[in-house]
Amino acid sequence: MIVLLFFDSYAYKPGVFTDYYAENIFGHIVPNATLWPATALLVGAYALRYRWIGLITPAKLKASQPTLP
């Protein structure tokens, strides 16, 4: 969060809020609080092998990558 807010190294723009900081925080929290734990639960619950992890992880990475300013 420090890198996100104070150093302004990257920006999330999900298009939900008009405030720049609220937009960044919301865009940061959603992927880190939902997508990555959901992937970990999926892998753990179904005991997925490396090839399946490799298939689902790039899709999650592409969905959660920030846009650069």
Image (cartoon, rainbow, N blue to C red):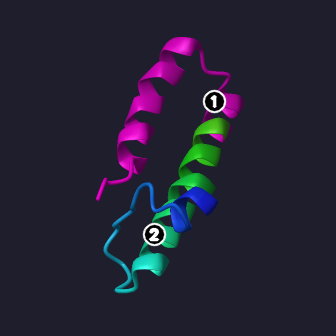
Alpha carbons under labels 1 and 2: distance apart: 28 Å
Earlier residue among tags 1 and 2 = 2
Query: How crowded is the residue under tag 1: few (<14 C-alpha within 10 Å), some, or many (20+)?
Result: some
Q: Using the image, determine if residue 32 lies above or below residue 41.
A: below
Q: Quadrant of the C terminus?
A: bottom left
Q: Using the image, determine if residue 65 lies above or below residue 56.
A: below
The residue nearer to you, when weighing 3 against 19, is 3
Tell me residue 16's x, y (percent): 36, 78
Q: Using the image, determine if residue 4 lies above or below residue 57.
A: below
Is any atom of residue 67 visible in this view? yes
In magenta segment, residue 61: yes
Is any atom of residue 1 visible in this view? no
Residue at x-position 41% and y-position 56%: 10
Residue at x-position 45% and y-position 30%: 56
In magenta segment, residue 66: yes
Tell me residue 4's x, y (percent): 53, 61
Left/right placement of residue 67 relative to residue 27 reads left
Q: Amino acid at mark 1?
A: Val
Q: Residue furthest front?
A: 7
SS assignment at label 1: helix
Which residues are the magenta region?
41-69
Residue 43, label in figure: 1
Residue at x-position 70% and y-position 33%: 45
Query: How crowded is the residue under tag 2: few (<14 C-alpha within 10 Å), some, or many (20+)?
Result: many
SS assignment at label 2: helix
Tell me residue 2's x, y (percent): 62, 61
Residue position marked by numbered label 2 in the rendering = 24
Residue at x-position 63% and y-position 30%: 43
| Quarter of the rendering containing residue 60 | top left
Q: Amino acid at mark 2?
A: Asn
Tell me residue 18's x, y (percent): 34, 86
**Marks 1 and 2 close (CB-CB < 8 Å):** no
